[in-house]
Image (cartoon, rainbow, N blue to C red):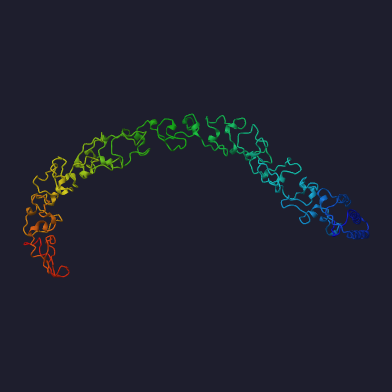
Amino acid sequence: MISTGKHYNNSSGAILRRLCLFASFSVAAHSRVILTTLAALFLFGFSSPALATPTPLQVEDHFSTGFALEGAHRRVDCESCHLNGIFAGAPRRCSACHNGSLGEGKPPNHVQSGNVCDDCHRTSSWTNVSFDHSSVTGSCTSCHNGATAVAKTPTHMPTSSICEDCHVTSNWTNVRFDHSATTAQCSTCHNRTTAPGKHATHIVSSNICDDCHVTSNWTNVSFDHASVAGSCASCHNGTTATGKTPTHLSTTNICEDCHVTSNWTNVRFDHAATTAQCSTCHNGTTVSGKHATHIVSSNTCDDCHVTSNWTNVSFDHASVTGSCASCHNGTTATGKTPTHLSTTNICEDCHVPSSWTNVRFDHAAATAQCSTCHNGTTAPGKHATHIASSNTCDDCHVTSNWTNVRFDHDAVTGTCSSCHNGTIATGKHATHIATTGQCDACHTKLAWTPANFDHDAIVGSCNGCHNGTTATGKPSNHFTTSLQCDDCHRTTSWFSVRYTHSSASFPGNHGGGVDCLNCHTTNSQTIAWKFSAYQPDCAGCHADDFKPGPHKKYENPDTLYTLSELRDCAGSCHMYTDSSLTTIKKRRNSRHRASDGDF
């Protein structure tokens, strides 16, 4: 239908339609042109508005063109298909209009298919699709991916095949199966539920079917013992498969204890399940027995040998009838070592076969000194904390009771305190005088008391001992003092006393023949100051000797120093010009000294 900008009524439209239809199907081409021209002139002769939607009459008449207007096409504007007023040659295939330009085409997510829309769609209802797989150009999984359409179910067997390798669209359940594309084990499907599995009489085995079977010929079996889960005897029972021969060794072993499937005659024998004695087989006929040089013993092989390693012998002396030396002679078996203790004992006097190193030693047969063996190598020697001594063990110890010691100081090479330290043996008691001297500096081992005392080794103070209890202390009339004894006395000559004033208050070395009692009037180190207000200066004792006259301080007016100003007699007493005390007229320094004979 074309739009001319003119209006025409229904009767005019009907006439025009008849002319158009006639023009479209006229046999003669020139008649078709004439009629078309008349139709156009007739059309432009009217001024009625364009008719956007076909009327029911127009829809029915459209059938005569060979393209019936059905479904949604009945509501489509005429000019949507008849472009530029051209009626003849209008497209009839869906895809000619539904191409995304003239009309809405396939969406981007449309199934990959041909362009014949009406293979699946109908104009009456576009979404009511009758799907035809023959028009699909993509693979099955392009749609059957679980989003666009149903995909493989969770229980579908694992496979790398595409759907069409096994399925056809005409009958989905009629499957032509290809085992080569299967990635799972056989038993994933062959489980007697999804597909036939192992039958009831199948040998006990793992579920890896293809260890023995192939898909091309199920009954052609390449047997693999590695997959068998049952014991050998479950098949090798003489019925299903060959079992033990009549001459087989009597044993409770299962086959696989000794045999391997790769080589049946290559046997790894397990003696553990054999119930007979070794000599039943190891008799020199069935298998090797004792050799000619074997020591004389019973036939109970396993007293000494183990089946896992025949040459690794755990020797049982109980089966031997000879003496130790009949074997332990340095040839058949190890004899005494070169470093063995020199002794006339036979082996069994000291050793037992159950534990060679567990020796019951008889010292009576030993002739050497203890230290010959007890040297820390052959036998235990002196331990690390043993007192320093000579190596003559029996000076103190006896073999019958090692811990019962009769101590002999003559064998001790260390100092007294190496033992007498309060741990190994009794040390100095709590009230012992402080000293660095060794015990034997004062004491002797023959008579501990009395001691031969040596003051030179004492590290404590004198009154640590000379306190009137431990040793003689100060007498009652002793000069009262806090000084230690050795400040005045010497241990070499007690009554030769030298006293040194240690107090900072002592006023120098008095050179005037001063006697101790001139100051120490009470026989004490502490003196009573005669004039205590002036202590510790000279005036503390000599205040009554002060004469003001000779001690002028300044002139104009004449002024004298006071006793308080000149309490230190050995100080300066300058004479100044006036009371400002800024200009010295006469210098006087240390006119009086304690060391002077005449003060």
Q: Nearer the viewer, residue 552 or 229?
A: 552
Q: Image point 60% across, 34% down: which residue?
A: 204
Residue placed furthest toward the front: 557
**Image position, residue 534 (x, y; %):** 13, 57
**Image position, residue 10 (x, y; %):** 89, 53
Q: Would residue 492 be found to the left or right of residue 138 on screen?
A: left
**Image position, residue 353 (x, y; %):** 36, 33
Q: Image point 38% across, 32% down: which residue?
A: 317
Which picture quadrant has residue 186? top right
**Image position, residue 297 (x, y; %):** 40, 31
Q: Nearer the viewer, residue 137 or 60?
A: 60
Q: How many marks?
A: 0
Tell me if residue 130 comes above or below residue 305 in the rendering.
below
Q: Nearer the viewer, residue 374 or 210?
A: 210
The quarter of the picture where the C terminus appears is: bottom left
Q: Would residue 403 be found to the left or right of residue 88 on screen?
A: left
The quarter of the picture where the N terminus appears is: bottom right
Q: Image point 23% across, 38% down: which residue?
A: 394
Tell me if residue 311 comes above or below residue 140 in the rendering.
above
